[in-house]
Amino acid sequence: MIDLFFATSPNVYKVSIALEEMGLEHRLIPVDLSKGEQRDAAKLAGANTGKVPVIIDYDPPDGGSPFTVFESGAILQYLGEKTDSFLPSDPRGRSVTMQWLFWQMGGLGPIGGQAWHFFAFAPRIAPATDNTYSFNRYFNMWSALWRTLEGQLADHEYIAGDYSIADMACFPWISYLEAREGAGRFPNVCRWRDAVAARPAVRTAYRKGAALDTGYERNEKGVTLFPWEGILKNVIVV
């Protein structure tokens, strides 16, 4: 059994997808971000990084005591090694997969988060502030990342060759936020996105996430609508 400390964010859905794809028994443990539960290590199996996802594996590969893993990329690597799946064993294939996993962790996720912040949050936090520069900067960088992925997928069915943890890492962000010029300008990304979205394990991961009772309403993308005051206090740094 693995516990996944859960909120409806792209970073958490990466891990949810991996758990389903790898056939690992698991539970989703909701974390109320608006109450700052993510900052309480006691509520996250000892992880003190102040964010989700976090997992605790009650049956770790070494047979020892339950093991806690934080950071979505590290969790994906851990699960791939635990199950010997979706992470190539040959050195070159493994390196390519890890390169694209790191690309997502260092670019696609952080830049997508900043683009979303200046699109959805900044106008509400500072309505009198001109955020044009910040908005343009991050959405231009976001489009550049889409162009990189479009080029990679021009001659690859999946990002690193075969379907892997690299695809699991990138899909939730690509499906969450389109490029500034629209997804239609990126046919290879759209082909890949639709193929991943159709996988039974991916559909199950999102279905389970949508069915989890968080105590709050969801938006059209299935994202939990935490109270704004709590998000401003406990999630957004202003």
Image (cartoon, rainbow, N blue to C red):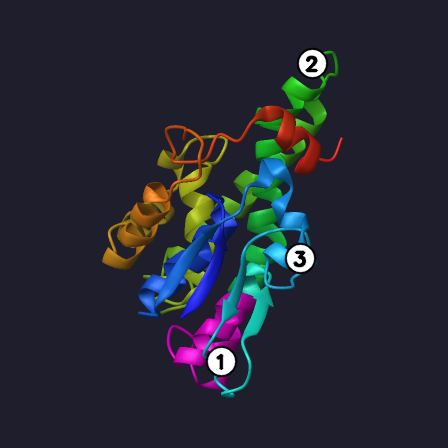
In this picture, is 126 found above or below 154? Answer: above
Q: Nearer the viewer, residue 215 or 202?
A: 215
**Residue 197: x percent and y percent?**
29, 49
Mark 3: which amino acid?
Ala
Q: Residue at 31% across / 69% down in the picture?
A: 23
Mark 1: which amino acid?
Pro
Please tell me whether mark 1 sits on a helix, a strand or a loop.
loop
Q: Residue at 34% across / 68% down in the picture?
A: 25
Q: Is residue 151 visible?
A: no
Q: CA distance from mark 3 to mark 2?
A: 34 Å
Left or right of residue 88: residue 62:
right
Q: Nearer the viewer, residue 95 or 173?
A: 173
Callout 2–callout 1 Cβ contact below 8 Å: no
Is residue 17 covered in magenta?
no
Quadrant showing the N terminus: bottom left
**Residue 118: x percent and y percent?**
63, 28
Q: Which mark is residue 41?
A: 3
Q: Nearer the viewer, mark 3 or mark 1?
A: 3
Callout 3–callout 2 Cβ contact below 8 Å: no
Residue bearing the label numbered 1: 60
Q: Residue at 41% across / 28% down in the picture?
A: 219
Callout 3–callout 1 Cβ contact below 8 Å: no
Q: Earlier in the sequence, mark 2 or mark 1?
A: 1
Please tell me whether mark 2 sits on a helix, a strand or a loop.
loop
